[in-house]
Image: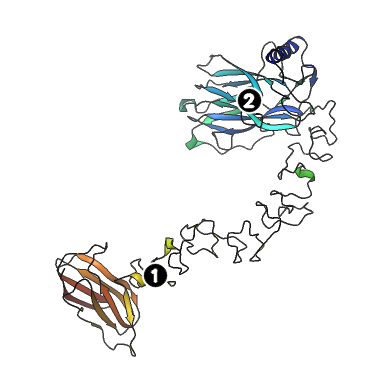
Amino acid sequence: MRNSSHISKALVAIGLVLILTGPALAQDGILSVSLDSTVGSFSGNHYVAAEEPITFLLRVTNFSSEWMQGITCGFRIYSPDGAEWGDVSIANDLGSLASEDFDLVWMTRVFSSHGAMSDTVGFFASVMEADGMPACYNEVTLSITVGPIGYQHEGKTLCLDSCFLPPANAWAWTNDGSDFYVPAWTGPHCFEIVDPCCAPPAPEITAGFGRPKSSYPDRFVATEGDEDGDGVSDFCDNCLGLPNPMQEDFDQDGLGYACDDCLDSDGDGFGDPGYASNECPDDNCPHEPNPDQTDSDGDLVGNACDNCINKSNHNQADKDADGVGDRCDNCRDVPNPHQVDSDNDDVGDECDNCKDTPNTDQTDSDGDGVGDACDPTAVAELDIPDLPEHFAVSQNYPNPFNPETRIQLDLPEACYVEIAVLNLLGQRVAVLADQPMAAGRYAVTWDGCNGAGTPVASGVYLYRVQAGHNHVTRKMMLLR
C-alpha cells in the first residue's frame, strides 16, 4: 500500500503530464467510461420526469492487462436551453471497488449563465489504495444525481458530457505513474424534460447510449492485441476469436455467451433450455441448482422449482399467484401459500365455507356463504319415498320457541324459493333461503338471529315463503 505522500505525488503527476506533454498512450474502448443507465428517468431512459431527480449510472471499463492506480475524469451537467436544478451529488460506491478503496477528491464548479446550477461541472480525481482498479474491470462504479427539476422547465433539455480540468484537454488514467492512458467516453447524452403524464413515446435507443459498442470508430488497441477486433483486449476477452464487445456472460462461468457451449445459469451442469448452442442436457429447473434433476411427477419441471411436485403441471399454472400450482392448491382463487386446512377436507381455510367441519363439496343450500355442514339455518332436503302432490308450508315447530325453530316446505315442482323472517312492521330480519330448489320436501331452521348473526329480541315475527307463484305468510313467537 502506498503512503499518503506517495499518493499525493502520483495525483499531481497525472495533472503535470496532462498539462505538459499530454497522454502517452490512447486506448479508446479498452479503457472507457460510459453511461450504463439512468434511474428516475421516464419513458425508456430518454426523458427526465419533471420534479423527479435523475441519476446517471456510469460504467467504468478497464479491458487492459494493467492495474490502474490513478484516475482523472470530469463530467459536465448542462442545459443548452436554460433549464435549472437545485442539487448535484456524486457517489462512487456502486461497484466492487468500494469507497474504502479510493482516496477521492471531488470538485464541483458552478457557472450560472442561465440560473442557479444550470451549468454544473464536476472534476473527479482518485488515487486507489492497494493494487487499484484490476485488469478486466467492467462495472457500474460512479453515479451522478441531478435535480429535482421543476415542471416549468418542461420541453427543455438536460445533458451529461465529459469535461477536463483546465488546462488539460483529456482525461487520464495511470498504472504506477509511468504510463498514461486516455479512456473513451460515449457522450454527450441529452434528455428532454417532460411532464410524466404527457410524455411522447420513447425513441429508439441509439448506438450512442450505453456502454461502448463495436461500431464506434477508431477503436485502438496498443500492446494488448485484439484478435477478433471487438475492442476487448485478448488479455480480458472471455471469448477469443468471436467478436463480443459487450462481454456477455449470462451464467457467470467466465466463458462469454458468444462461444459458450453450455449456457448454465444455475451452475448445476445442465443447460438453459432454448439455447441452440448447448451441448449439455437441458435443465428441468434452469434457475435453481438441481444436479440430480429429480422430477417426481414427470412433468419435465424439476422438483427444485415445481410449484406442484406430486401432480403433473407442465405449464405451472397458479391462478392466485401464491406459489402453489393449481393442481395442488386447496384454494385456487384465494392466495394461501401455507395451504392451511383445519378440517382436512381438502378445501383450504381461506376459501372453506365451514372451516371446522369437513365438507368437501362445500354445499351451501341457502347461499349465505356458510356451508350446510355448520350452518344453523341451512335448508335440508328430507328423504321421502314420493314427491309431494301439493304445495304446502307447515307451521313452525316448536312455537313459541327458544333458541331455534323449524319450518317444513313441500314443493311439487322445481321453482325459485325465498324464505324470509320479518318483524311486525314488515322489515326483513333474516333470509333463510334464496335459491332455486328441485321438487321435494325441505326443512329450514331459524336460530333467532338477524342477517348479521346477532340474536333478536323476544316477540312475534313473521316468516314468508315465496315459491314460484305461491306465497304464504305465518306468525311465530320467540321467547327469550
For mark 2, what is the residue? Answer: 100
Determine whether 94 is above or below 341 in the image. Answer: above
Indicate left or right for 67 with 323 as reference: right
* Quarter of the figure with the C terminus: bottom left
Residue 355 pos. (x, y %): 40, 65
SS of the residue at dot 2? helix
- What is the quadrant of residue 232 in the picture? top right
- What is the quadrant of residue 63 in the picture? top right
Specify the farthest residue to the bottom.
385
Q: Is residue 221 visible?
A: yes
Residue 53 pos. (x, y %): 52, 29
Indicate left or right for 478 with 437 as reference: left
Q: Which of 149 and 109 is in front in this view?
A: 109
Q: Which mark is residue 357?
A: 1
Q: What residue type is labelled 2?
A: Glu
Q: Tell me which label, 1 or 2, sits earlier in the chain.
A: 2
- Badge 1: how crowded within 10 Å, few (<14), some, or many (20+)? some
Indicate left or right for 405 with 145 as reference: left
CA distance for labels 1 and 2: 63 Å
Residue 464 pos. (x, y %): 21, 73
Residue at image x 39%, y 72%?
363
SS of the residue at dot 1? loop
